[in-house]
Amino acid sequence: MKKTIVSILMMAFFLVSFTDSSHAQKPDYEKYGKIAMAVVQADFSGAPIREYEYLGRKNIDASKAEDSFRFKVQENNQNFFVIIKVNHDLTNKKLINLTVESQKQ
């Protein structure tokens, strides 16, 4: 069920990003931050997200990169971090892989 919800949310974000008509300069990781946020909200529904941080980008090779995001989530009165790593192609701006790591405190 969670995979279906995550898939639907990811598709919605892809459609929104293609139909965005604003001309303002946005950070190039914003698209992947929205996807990461949707994944955390779907996997931990009902649990409030307390913090959000962009950890940075690692270049994998000339055309691929990995953006990392950290979320502080509170579930059952316990805080923990969720790390989302998004691998994507820099030339065509397509998502390649997404990993989710939960780190209990």
Image: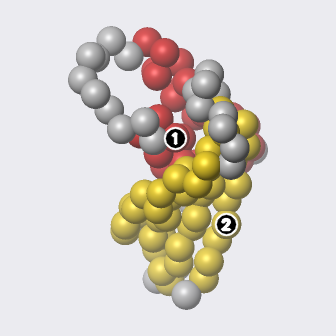
Which residue is rendered at x = 55% and y = 87% of the image?
105
- Give the amino acid type for the residue marked by disc 2 in the picture: Glu
Q: Disc 2 on helix, strand or loop?
A: strand
Q: How is the image coloured?
A: secondary structure
Q: Residue furthest left?
A: 24
In this rendered view, identify the residue nearer to me: 23 or 48.
Answer: 23
Q: With respect to residue 29, does 90 lie above or below?
A: above
Pointer 2 local density, CA inside 10 Å: few below 14, some 14–19, many at least 20: few
Q: Which mark is residue 105?
A: none
Residue 47 horizontal/vertical position (percent): 48, 64
Residue 71 horizontal/vertical position (percent): 47, 64
- In the rendered structure, the answer to whether residue 101 lies left or right of residue 50 reads right
Q: Hey, which quadrant is residue 7 in on the image?
A: top right
Pointer 1 local density, CA inside 10 Å: few below 14, some 14–19, many at least 20: many
- Give the amino acid type for the residue marked by disc 1 in the picture: Tyr
Q: Residue furthest bottom?
A: 105
Which residue is rendered at x = 45% and y = 41% of the image?
29
Q: Earlier in the sequence, mark 2 or mark 1?
A: 1
* Residue corresponding to mark 2: 101
Residue 72 horizontal/vertical position (percent): 45, 70
Marker count (numbered): 2
